[in-house]
Image (tube, rainbow, N blue to C red):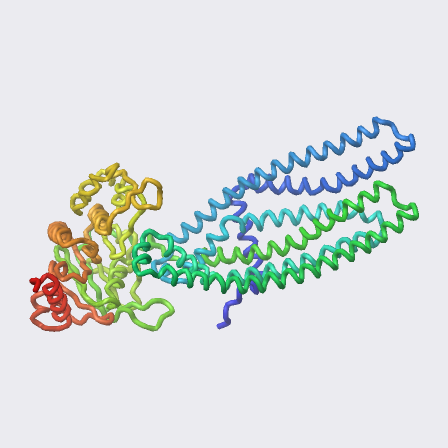
Amino acid sequence: MRAPLPDDHLPLRERLRDLRATLALVWQASPRHSLTYAATSLAGSALPAANLYVGKLLLDEVARAAQGGVAYTSLLTLLGAQVSLVVLGSLLSTVQSAAQQLLGDSLQHGVSRRILNKAATLSVENFENAETYDRLQQAYREVGSRPLGVATQLVSLGGAAVTLGSVGALMATLGPWVLPLVVLASVPGVVVGNRFGVEGYRMLRRQTHDARVQNYLGSLLTSDAHVKEVRLFGFEGELLRRWRDYYLGFRQHLVALVRRRAGWSFGAALLSALLIGLASALILRRAAAGEVSVGEFSVFVLGIAQVQSTVSSLLGGGSAVYQNLLYMRNLFDFLELPTRDLDAGEVWSGPIHTIEFREVGFRYPLTERDVLRGVSFTLRRGEALALVGENGAGKTTVVKLLTLLFVPTSGQILLNGQDAARFSPRSVQREMSIIFQDFGQYQLTARDNVALADAAQPEGAARVPAALERAGADFVAGLPEGLDTPLGRLFQGGRQLSGGQWQRLALARLYHRDASVLIFDEPTAALDARAEFDTIQALREQTRGRLTLLISHRFSTVRLADTIVVLEGGKVTERGTHAELMARGGHYAEMYTLQARGYSESVGPAS
């Protein structure tokens, strides 16, 4: 299979497709403002030639007036025409600027919404891929200016063609070689700018990953979540060194690019100056022969800057459209990532009574190692099953499969005896509630932190106090504004919580949803001994009549389960009750004994 082409080497057909898609984004954002911007821009493009022509007439009339051959009213008429053109230009510019600003705002909102909608449909596996994060970051970076830049530059190209045609027609009357020389003088600078614009894009593209790492290192030095460890272990200097190393690597490439661009730009400016000098010499020769009027000479002097600016806009505009389309490809790459429709399939209704893993295997895309192999077990309503294993054994992957966040690469997951693949993940997930080991700490109010678990139910907020009570989160009542207290330090007025308090809120979030399947992934990891005991007692009460899956490294929690499944290297190696597994003397018994011995040694009598 042919390797994919780099973005800046895609065929013209692909570029045109991206151009159509970009213009569609702009048009859909606001048709009215798009038309207004285009119309005022094109109308304003004819004004430079009109101003030059009226100015020429006025200067010629002034020259004749000096000889006593022109009436004062004639001069006033031309002056009025010139002032009218200035007023019209200001009016068009004002309307154009307002339309562009409003169009840009609508466009940024529309594209941001597309990105967020896309992110909401990506599978969890995508978010565990660093490349996806790079694409997401690149997409967000281009939201503000690139789509609007493509549209405005296309309109500017049309306007530049109008301006060049009208101003060029005036300058063509000065001699056959004047206009070609002035146009040619504009080309070198545009060619150099285009070349180094593309090189700058390639450099930024190559640096995307390093920039993300550098930003992460900077966040470690400025984050309240990491400041304690950074200060205690004193590795600020190491983080700063690494941060600066990434900067110096970027700087090295930037310096080389800037030096080369400066050299070529100077050469282009020198060549342009020589060509303009030649055109000026031709005009001065005609002026010395009395063949050029004062007004015509003003057209040449003022027209030089106008033509050069217009030619640069034409050539540079095409280049800028091309470059912006390179960046737009970043956005389209993200929007074209494969999605997973969580609402596709039959709608599940009613409680889940059994969940069976039948020879389930899983392998991450683009990898060659099976995370899970032939995993089989059954959860039944009214029973609790615990998954036990060392880090990396596959416990979290089992949870992601059970909650239909992942799709098995082999085997089946059965819900009440029916293949889970038949049903829409979203409808099945409504029957599940979970606390993850890396539970969310939402910088919202305490009420929102719990109510989000059932945000689709309008009456859900009324059940928040009951969920907090079941989770033992009585500390909320002591917060300055109770349930309406903002949490975290991200926003002004926020109240930071301890790790255990955040975990209590996560438990309350789990209890808030009336689900038939409860999943506890390290539910007591951040709790002290007393809080852990209270939580375990609450778990015994709350899990009755439901399917319960427990994942924990604390065997005081694991012993709650009716059945314990031991995972090693992605395979089930043992299963049974606590007593049965201890009697068997296998891996479970070894882990339990090690933990119990460590606990007894840590609390034993002091010598």
Of 588 and 287, which appears nearest the observer? 287
Q: Residue 417: which quarter of the image?
A: bottom left
Q: Position of residue 350 (x, y in %)?
A: 21, 50
Q: Is residue 545 visible?
A: no
Q: Residue furthest top?
A: 73
Of 425 and 254, which appears nearest the observer? 254
Identified at 52% across, 55% down, the residue is: 328
Vertical placement of 111 versus 133: above or below? above
Vertical placement of 465 versus 137: above or below? above
Identified at 68% across, 40% down, the residue is: 44
Vertical placement of 567 versus 484: above or below? below
Identified at 24% across, 66% down, the residue is: 391
User: Quick check: 425 left or right of 515?
Assistant: right
Identified at 35% across, 58% down, the residue is: 123
Q: Residue furthest front?
A: 607
Q: Position of residue 124 (x, y in %)?
A: 34, 58
Q: Quadrant of the C terminus?
A: bottom left
User: Quick check: 144 left or right of 586?
Assistant: right
